[in-house]
Image (cartoon, rainbow, N blue to C red):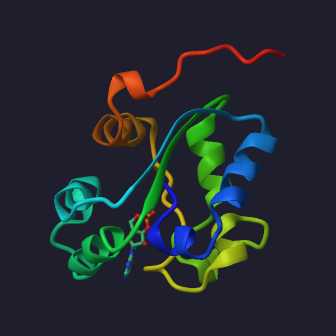
Amino acid sequence: MIKPDGVHRGLVGDVIKRFEQRGYKLVGIKVLVPSRELAAKHYAEHDGKPFFPKLVDFLSSGAVVAMVFEGKDIVRTGRTMVGATNPLASSPGTLRGDYGIDVGRNVIHGSDSVESAMREIALWFKADELADYTPAW
Ligand code: CMP
């Protein structure tokens, strides 16, 4: 998911391009301004941490682009492409390493496990919003 800072800075195209050029298949995408309730559900595992209220405020502060990609080892490889949570610790060449210095405004969220991905996809998408198709090649 491209967070409000990434959308505001015009980084949507670059994020999608990186996943597409790697060979991942885009099967779901939507633009929305998340409610505080949706943002809190998305970050439920962080509820109670000192930064949780700001996290919810920030995610619901503007438009986000929620996406579902499919492909070999997408969760693990996707995390590598996204980079470390703290952009200061992210390698150049990763999205966060190329575009951020602030842990709160770190451009993009990537599911950290297959289980998280399943939960997050169900939270952000209805089943009929995910395309079932075979690439032409
Ligand atoms: P994300 O991968 O979306 O998952 C949880 C988010 O919490 C993380 O990216 C950061 O944006 C945010 N986060 C983690 N640690 C901190 C922190 N110490 N202060 C503020 N935000 C944080």
Q: Position of residue 117 (x, y in %)?
A: 42, 39
Q: Nearer the viewer, residue 105 or 117?
A: 105
Q: Position of residue 131 (x, y in %)?
A: 52, 22
Residue shown at the point (75%, 51%) measured from the top left? 18
| For residue 32, side relative to residue 102 (left or right) | left
| For residue 127, side relative to residue 51 (left or right) | right
Question: Above or below — where is 19 with respect to 106?
Answer: above
Please state the total of marks drawn on the protein image: 0
Question: Above or below — where is 27 with respect to 132?
Answer: below
| For residue 64, side relative to residue 22 (left or right) | left
Q: Position of residue 99 (x, y in %)?
A: 67, 76
Residue shown at the point (73%, 74%) measured from the top left? 98
**Quarter occupied by residue 61:** bottom left
Quadrant of the snapshot with the C terminus: top right
**Quarter occupied by residue 62:** bottom left
**Quarter occupied by residue 56:** bottom left
Residue shown at the point (65%, 67%) measured from the top left? 11
